[in-house]
Structure formats: C-alpha cells, structure tokens
Image (spheres, helix red, strand yellow):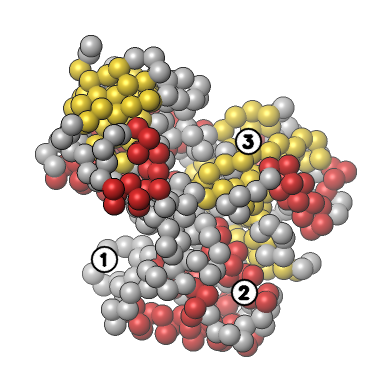
Amino acid sequence: MKKNNVIVIGSGISGLLSALALSREGKKVVILEKESYIGGVCRSYDVSDYRVDTGPHAITRLENGPLKELMDRYFNRVPQFIPFGKYYVKIGSEIKPFPWSINAWLTFGLLPMTDRLLLMRALFNILYLKNAGKDFSNISLSEILPHKVSMTTRRFLDWLCYFMVGTSIENAPISRFVDNKTHHPRTIPYVGKLYDLFITEGATDQGYPKGGLQSIVSSIVESFPKDSVEIKTNEPVKKIECSERVEGVITSEDSYDCDTVVYSGFSSDLPCLIDGLPVAYTQNLTSIKRVNSLTIWLGLTKKLFNNYGSEIWVDSDPYAWVVPTSNYDSSLAPKGNQLVGFAFTLPGEYNASTIRNKAFQTIVDNMPDIEKHIDMIHYQELIPEKASWGINCGFGDVRTPIKNLYCVGTDTTKRSAGVNRSAYSVLKFLDIIKSDGNL
C-alpha cells in the first residue's frame, strides 16, 4: 500500500484549489472523486450546440480578493475574465441599474422614496452599532427593517438575502451584510456589503470567465506540477480511518494510507465517514442547512437580452437572477443565438417537477414572447452553497477534532459566496496547515 502525502476528497473548486496549492508547495496529492467528472458545481458542459455552466456565476473581487490571491500564487495560466457589467433590477415592466452609490440609491425610482430614506437611516444605525461592538450574528435583517417599508422594498431585500445568504430576510443575519472586504487598518470596521450597496461605485471588480466556468477548472489542472497530482474519478469514499489522527481513506475501489486528508465534501456528511466524532461537533454538522437552487438554461434564436450585465427579477416567484452568458462569450451559443441562465433559489423541500414548471412559467410571465424563440431548454438542480449563512443554522470549520484532517468548501467559512467563499476557505486552510507544521 503506497503512502501518500495528502488525500483530497472531492474535486470541486475547493478541492482542486487545495490540491493545486499543496502540490505547488511540494506535496504529492491524490484526489478522490465519486463522480465521473471533476469541478463539482464549478464546471461547464455541452447541451446540444450550447456550452452551459453549472448555474450562472459572477466571479467577484478579482482585483484583490481570495481567488486573485490564489491565482497569483499558484496558477501557471490565469483564466481571462470579461468585465461582468451592470446589475439591473426588474420590478414590474421597469428595469433600472442597481443603485450602488448614494446618489443612485436616492434616485432609484423602482422603490418608494420614503423607503429609500428609511433604509439609509437604518444602514447608518447599523454601522454605528457595529463600530460600538454590537454583535449582529443572531439579529436578522428583518428585525432592523423599518416597519413602514412597502412590500416591494421588502421583496427587493428578500431577494438579496436569498442570493447572498441562501435564506429569507427573516433568517439572514445582519453580520452577513457587513462582511468586511479588507483588513486594511484604515478601513471602517465591518463595512462590507450594505456599505458597498450605497457608498461604492459598484461591481467594478467582477468578471465572467471567457470559455465558461470550465476555463477556471482547466487553468487549475494545467497548473498542477508534473507527476504531483493524481485524480481518481468514479471512486466514492466509504470511510476515513482515524485514531488520534487521520490514518487513511477507504474507497469503493481501494484503500490509501496518508499523512493528511483534506475533505471538500459536505461537512454534514462527515459523521457518516468517521466513527466516534465528538457529540457536540456532530450535532453542529447535522444542523447545517444546504442551499438549493434551480437553473433553467434557455438557448434562444433571437437576442432578447441586450444589456451588458445580469438582471435581478424581484417580482418573479421564485426569485430569479438572469445572466445572458453568451453576451460575454459568443462562442457559448450557435452564431446568432443567445444563451441565458435563469437561477432560482428553492425552499428546503420541494417537488422537482412542480418547481420546474413554476420557474419556467415565471420566465414566460415576465417575457411573454420568449417561448417562440426557445431553441434549447436545460434544467439543473444544484447546491451552490453547502451551508446557508442563516440564524440558528450550523456551520462547519476548516479545523476538525481529528489531527491532520481538514475541511474546505463553502460550509467551512462565513465569508463572501460561491467561488470566493471556496477560495477564502482554502486560504484559511493553508494558514492553519502551516501553523500546524504540516506545510
């Protein structure tokens, strides 16, 4: 039985980034993947003549965020990112750019002026209380929302909660929206998302990867040092063997001794793979709530979305985020056609057929003429975030009770969302493994 430096369980974006960093730091890595493909929910594949992603994505914080840091450190080839453009808000038949600055917010006519002023006051009250040491981790956005705001404004904020936190406005903690972007000593503490919504100039450091999400995965794989990373697909893990420390991994096909295991699967599944975990640790993991989503990809014979950017559909049921990916890269659709992803957040329990019909109908309700231009339709049910950042919801961590067993992924750190949350978890993991003397 060959001794391996590191076993990485799972080949999603977190597992791949971890394997890249470790291999570039001199470790021999084996990646064990249960599926026949790598990339998890960060990949692309072909449907008819279209190239769809696993859900629409905007890659944020490209100027100085966590993915940028990992790319600078470890990538031999960096993907090309196309500026993402504007976010447009659609309420009723009106569409306006998202109000990123104070001036834009005050003139944002899709919401009543009274509501905008009330929310401005609430924003600065939050910042004052945060700087005074108030803990917002168990206070929902709904609790500080002025009672007099209209239903339209409440739905607008509820949309933000579902797509940024993975839960409703009643369960979204204020702390998620004051996630500080930077540790620079001159920045106002915890001034993050809410501040950015009204103070900064918008999503200027966001992009879409040319060639789709697959270009990120391809760049990672191409950056692996020669003979340092082995990827084994179709090999689900059955057991992680531990005593006081991790000892090895048993799969459906083989068993592996190793010094270190990096687990990038669902943290909530760890109790099924490891015997004897502490009760409190297990209880926390089992209380994690995953975020469910549905994406409907439509190939259209006519370019119906002309704006350079994405759309926030506040009136749709369920809420929708619309991204015409072929506007960024025309090669993703046949010449003259358009590829558009409609992402919907879903309740914890749902009937797949019913929710598909309901989501498709809300597309038609918002755009009655779209049906006659549909050339391709493709449905994806996905888990874009492995843990909802909600009040009274469990959340994992990079460090585990088992020595030399680490976790990475979107259920291990409460920063940002999507690819960037994965990247933050990998940076945190690298800091911890170095402090443990294992790197």
The answer to whether residue 106 is above or below residue 79 is: below
Expressed as whole percent of the image width and height from the top left, the position of residue 104 reads 58, 76
Q: Secondary structure at mark 3?
A: strand
Q: Is the Cβ of the residue at disc 3 closer than 8 Å to that at disc 2?
A: no
Q: Is residue 251 left or right of residue 204?
A: left
Quote the CA–CA distance across marks 3 and 1. Answer: 38 Å
Q: Is residue 132 left or right of residue 379?
A: left
In the rendered structure, which disc, 3 or 1, sits on the residue that comes first in sequence? 3
* Mark 1, residue position: 184
* Mark 2, residue position: 154
Residue 127 makes an appearance in the image: yes
Amino acid type indicated by mark 3: Val
Q: Is the Cβ of the residue at disc 1 closer than 8 Å to that at disc 2?
A: no
Query: Quadrant of residue 124 in the image?
Result: bottom left
The answer to whether residue 119 is above or below residue 96 is: below
Q: Secondary structure at mark 1?
A: loop
Q: Nearer the viewer, mark 3 or mark 2?
A: 2
In the rendered structure, which disc, 1 or 2, sits on the residue that comes first in sequence? 2
Amino acid type indicated by mark 1: His
Query: Quadrant of residue 73 in the image?
Result: top left
Residue drawn at point x = 71 percent, y = 36 percent: 378
* Mark 3, residue position: 52
Amino acid type indicated by mark 2: Arg
Expressed as whole percent of the image width and height from the top left, the position of residue 157 reads 58, 70
- The front one of 227 and 293 is 293
Q: Is residue 242 left or right of residue 182?
A: left
